[in-house]
Image (cartoon, rainbow, N blue to C red):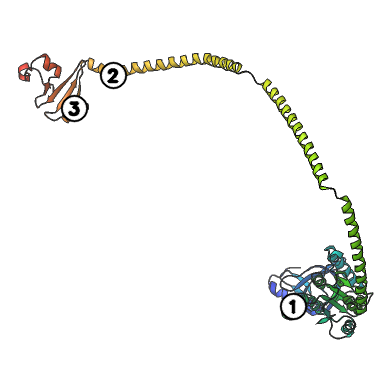
Amino acid sequence: MSENHNAPFITVGELSASVKRTLESAFEYVRVKGEISRPSFPASGHVYFNLKDDTHNLGAVVWKGVAAGLDVRPEEGLEVIATGKLTSFSGQSKYQLVVRQLEIAGEGALLKQLEERKRRLEAEGLFAPERKQALPAFPRTIGIVTSPTGAVIQDILHRLSDRFGVHVLVWPVLVQGAGSAEQVERAIKGFNQITGDDGMPRPDLLIVARGGGSLEDLMSFNEEAVVRAAAASDIPLISSIGHETDTTLLDYVADRRAPTPTAAAEMATAVKAEISARVAEWDGRQKVAMARRLENAAQFLAGATRGLTHPSERVNAQSQALDVAATNLVRFTERRLYDRRQRLDQLATRLSPPHAQLAKMTRRFDTASEKMRPLVTGLLERVDARMNSAARLLEANSFTKVLERGFALVRDEAGTPVKQASSLADGAPIHITFADDTRRAIVGASGAVPVPSPKAKKAAKPVKPASAKDTGQSELF
């Protein structure tokens, strides 16, 4: 078959919308039986889970508005019948069931759910006997969580009126159907939040009661939220749900379980005649116990008197103990000194005499001196050779050697060598150093005029120097 590239096309969104309309029109109302798998409860309020059988898996969603009114809370492994319509979710290219109603698929599935929930809560320790609180002997206020209509509340109030008078607070709730579990949970928490500061008395005891019914009717008292609220209650709680053969998870977590609402009222309060008899019994037992206590005290006093010793005997005994302690102290001190002396002698034998130590150090010093002598001699010889070599080099480079070859050194009055004649002004005094002596002179226009040194003045009279014309020689400068 050849492909037709000119055939009209549709967009992905149009195709997804067409599939969605087809599914919803063909499966607008379906009831699907399956086992709940991987339920999730995000913050949006919607509920997501999968319905599965042995080989297939179907995604399901319960929108927020429907989830609040469900009779059955989706839990892992629970077999249910889900009613709703089939639709598609184009964002992930899959189809899913939008659930409108959820019901347990038979009593067996419901019992399986309860057993699984019971094992999980029991593993957390919520049913542990050590968590249970003792009931108050004489409660002044009792809070009752039950339906305000029906025989249950009447039976409880009638039984309470026959016994010790107590103040009763009734928190009306639904005891079955949608929203009943939430109302029971709020009632238990509400009673625990009463402080008594606003005039409302805080209950000393709580009774949660309901008449008989089927397993589905009692499911509100199997909800996890109700069980956890009862476990967290600071007020002791009696559970009286259904008939004697009925058992709910609330019965396991309650501090006491009553088979009937009437029995719960009897547990909560005592009969006056029974209290009077018990008080009389306690009074008799107290008198007997007091007489026995006084008799035992008298016998103990007599025995203690016989066991007392005279003060002088106690002083003598203490003095003897002091003598024994002093003797032991002397022996201990002597033994301690003897041990220290022995230890000192042992240490003394390990020490060598001072003269031996001095001789040993002298030998070590002599040995070190013999080793150091050739090293110091060699070092001095090398230093002397270096100094001689430097002296010869200095002498070879000395300017006096240059003067001996006929040169002269000219310096100004400050002693600075003169390198250029132009740096001297007429009449400036100078010093001329020869190989054997230094002469002073004055720079003139026609040459230098010698200045006799102090020695020359003493040796001869000043002689007027001949001019260059008289001597026939050229000027020095």
Q: Amino acid at mark 1?
A: Gly
> Disc 1 to disc 2, how far (Cα)?
120 Å
Q: Secondary structure at mark 2?
A: loop
| Image height of 422 relative to 365, above or below | below
Quarter that holds the N terminus: bottom right
Q: How many marks?
A: 3
How many residues crowd mark 2 within 10 Å: few (<14), some (14–19), many (20+)? few
Q: Residue 4 at what x, y percent from top left? A: 71, 70
Q: Residue 44 at what x, y percent from top left? A: 71, 73
How many residues crowd mark 1 within 10 Å: few (<14), some (14–19), many (20+)? few
Q: Which residue is mark 2?
A: 398
Q: Residue 183 at what x, y percent from top left? A: 79, 79
- Left or right, 367 with respect to 48, comes to left
Quarter that holds the C terminus: top left
Specify the quadrant of the image occupied by residue 292. bottom right
1 and 2 marks in contact (CB < 8 Å): no
Q: Amino acid at mark 2?
A: Ser
Q: Nearer the viewer, residue 114 or 474?
A: 114
Q: Residue at x 75, y 29 (%)?
A: 335
| Image height of 359 relative to 211, above or below | above
Q: Secondary structure at mark 3?
A: strand
User: Of label 3 and label 2, which has the lower sequence position?
Assistant: 2
1 and 3 marks in contact (CB < 8 Å): no
Q: Nearer the viewer, residue 442 or 185?
A: 185
Can residue 128 be seen from the camera position used here? Answer: no
Q: Residue at x 70, y 25 (%)?
A: 341
> Disc 3 to disc 2, how far (Cα)?
21 Å
Q: Which residue is mark 1?
A: 196
Extreme residue toward the right, this view: 245
Q: Residue at x 72, y 76 (%)?
A: 17
Q: Which residue is mark 3?
A: 412
